[in-house]
Image (tube, grey):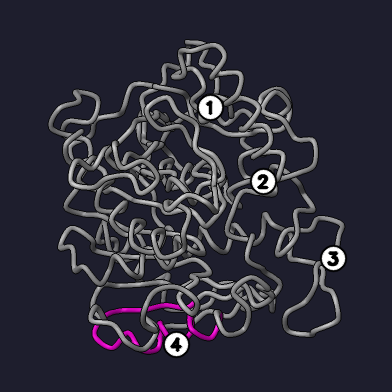
């Protein structure tokens, strides 16, 4: 894969910690991060019909960093958004909800612990965006059900370090925790916004809201004017987010030029089997799976394989990690190195391929190396037109390890 050196190259100090998360050293660009809220004025929030549908969204981007200045890395609490809640009593309630939500990643885990010792990321909060002759392509990411937009920095932050602007929202009602208009929102089975049918309907529309929102931001926010190519978009997502991406492709948005579906829940979501019954078989796609994924199961994995093989009119690729699981496609290893379902430094996980038995997942750094090697090459090939990356996609570069199935559709 090719990269381009720039004046924004950050210090190599501490790169080992990032390589453990990304599977690779960071790319040539320093990374900034900022939080914004996008609102769709044409939709109401299913959980509060007096409000429009709004999305707390994180944007990672290539930035300018003066190495002579002391820059503090982004903290996990910066993602949470409690500072936007002005009422002290409400802020205290929101903190309690947030700690309960993130404590679900590991018993007893708190935002304070994440800030002080657990959370590792490279991005600098609200750093000055870098301007180059050509704008950076836009990547949109959609999280899984019950997940959180920040729990995928191995992917989002890594892509930004290679010259992409990456926007990831929380899907209200589906996200583990989010803050919209100063109000904390968590999943609630009694709320219409958390109903399966509502999430299936709203999530693809959220993708459009993000792309439209970024276009508006590029016209109105001097930080991003001329820096983002919103006509050269890649849509990516994990689990329910993978379904979200597949469903959005059916809208034939001409701005979307490539898509990556990570362990997509297409077999159990939506009103039709998208792996065989869809209208968009042109947009280049890559499907990533974990052979031991006990969440979408063998039916879900086979649907992912079929999606690749039925993509008749465009390029398609399949990546399948043999000792990978559902959570391999997240950064949950930061929360807990033995999180399970594809993440297990010292603890075995229940096996899908051999029911009743267990397996030790492939080291998560190696899994992320595979994911990011092919994910970056795919996006470089179809969003930046890099021929060497297109050539990289033609073969299994991890064949000798015996840990990866990789093929074209």
Q: From this view, report whether residue 107 is shown above or below residue 117.
A: below
In front: label 1 or label 2: 2
Numbered disc 1: secondary structure: loop
The disc, 2 or 4, on the residue closer to the chain's N-terminal end is: 2
The span picked out in magenta is 301-318
Q: CA distance from mark 4 to mark 3?
A: 29 Å
Labels 1 and 3 touching (C-beta < 8 A): no
- What residue sits right under mark 2 in the picture? 20
- What residue sits right under mark 1 in the picture? 11
Q: Residue at x 35, y 72 (%)?
A: 285
Q: CA distance from mark 1 to mark 3?
A: 37 Å
In magenta stretch: residue 320 = no
Neighbourhood count class around disc 2 (C-alpha, 10 Å): few under 14, some 14–19, many 20 upward: some
The disc, 1 or 2, on the residue closer to the chain's N-terminal end is: 1
Identify the mark at residue 306; answer none if there is no mark. 4
The disc, 1 or 4, on the residue closer to the chain's N-terminal end is: 1
Q: Nearer the viewer, residue 309 or 243?
A: 243
Image location (x, y in percent) of residue 106: 76, 44
Labels 1 and 4 touching (C-beta < 8 A): no
- What residue sits right under mark 3 in the picture? 348
Image location (x, y in percent) of residue 251: 21, 68
Numbered disc 3: secondary structure: loop
The disc, 4 or 3, on the residue closer to the chain's N-terminal end is: 4
Residue 60 in sight in this render: no
Neighbourhood count class around disc 3 (C-alpha, 10 Å): few under 14, some 14–19, many 20 upward: some
Q: From this view, report whether residue 239 is shown above or below residue 187.
A: below
Q: Quadrant of residue 9?
A: top left
């Amino acid at each position: 894969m090719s990269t381009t050196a720039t004046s924004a190259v950050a210090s190599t100090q501490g790169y080992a910690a990032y390589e453990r998360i990304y599977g690779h050293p960071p790319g040539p660009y320093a990374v900034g991060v900022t939080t914004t809220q996008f609102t769709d004025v044409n939709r109401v929030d299913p959980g509060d019909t007096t409000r429009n549908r709004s999305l707390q969204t994180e944007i990672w981007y290539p930035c300018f960093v003066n190495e002579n200045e002391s820059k503090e890395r982004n903290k996990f609490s910066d993602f949470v958004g409690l500072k936007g809640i002005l009422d002290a009593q409400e802020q205290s309630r929101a903190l309690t909800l947030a700690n309960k939500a993130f404590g679900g990643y590991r018993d007893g885990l708190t935002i304070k612990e994440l800030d002080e010792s657990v959370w590792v990321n490279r991005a600098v909060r609200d750093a000055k965006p870098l301007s180059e002759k050509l704008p950076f392509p836009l990547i949109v990411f959609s999280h899984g059900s019950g997940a959180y937009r920040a729990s995928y920095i191995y992917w989002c932050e890594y892509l930004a370090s290679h010259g992409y602007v990456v926007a990831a929202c929380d899907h209200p009602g589906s996200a583990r925790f989010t803050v919209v208009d100063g109000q904390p929102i968590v999943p609630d089975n009694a709320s219409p916004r958390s109903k399966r049918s509502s999430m299936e309907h709203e999530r693809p529309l959220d993708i459009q809201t993000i792309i439209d929102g970024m276009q508006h931001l590029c016209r109105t926010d001097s930080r991003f004017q001329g820096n983002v190519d919103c006509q050269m978009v890649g849509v990516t997502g994990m689990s329910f987010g993978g379904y979200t991406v597949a469903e959005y492709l059916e809208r034939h948005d001409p701005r979307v030029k490539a898509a990556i579906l990570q362990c997509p829940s297409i077999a159990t979501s939506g009103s039709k089997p998208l792996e065989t019954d869809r209208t968009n078989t042109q947009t280049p796609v890559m499907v990533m799976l974990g052979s031991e994924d006990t969440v979408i199961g063998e039916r879900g994995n086979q649907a992912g394989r079929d999606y690749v093989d039925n993509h008749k009119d465009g390029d398609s690729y399949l990546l399948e990690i043999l000792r990978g699981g559902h959570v391999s496609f997240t950064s949950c290893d930061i929360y807990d190195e033995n999180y399970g379902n594809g993440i297990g430094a010292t603890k075995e996980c229940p096996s899908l391929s051999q029911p009743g038995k267990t397996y030790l997942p492939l080291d998560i750094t190696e899994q992320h190396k595979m994911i990011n090697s092919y994910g970056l090459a795919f996006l470089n090939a179809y969003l930046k037109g890099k021929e060497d990356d297109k050539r990289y996609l033609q073969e299994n570069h991890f064949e000798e390890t015996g840990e990866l199935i990789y093929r074209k559709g």
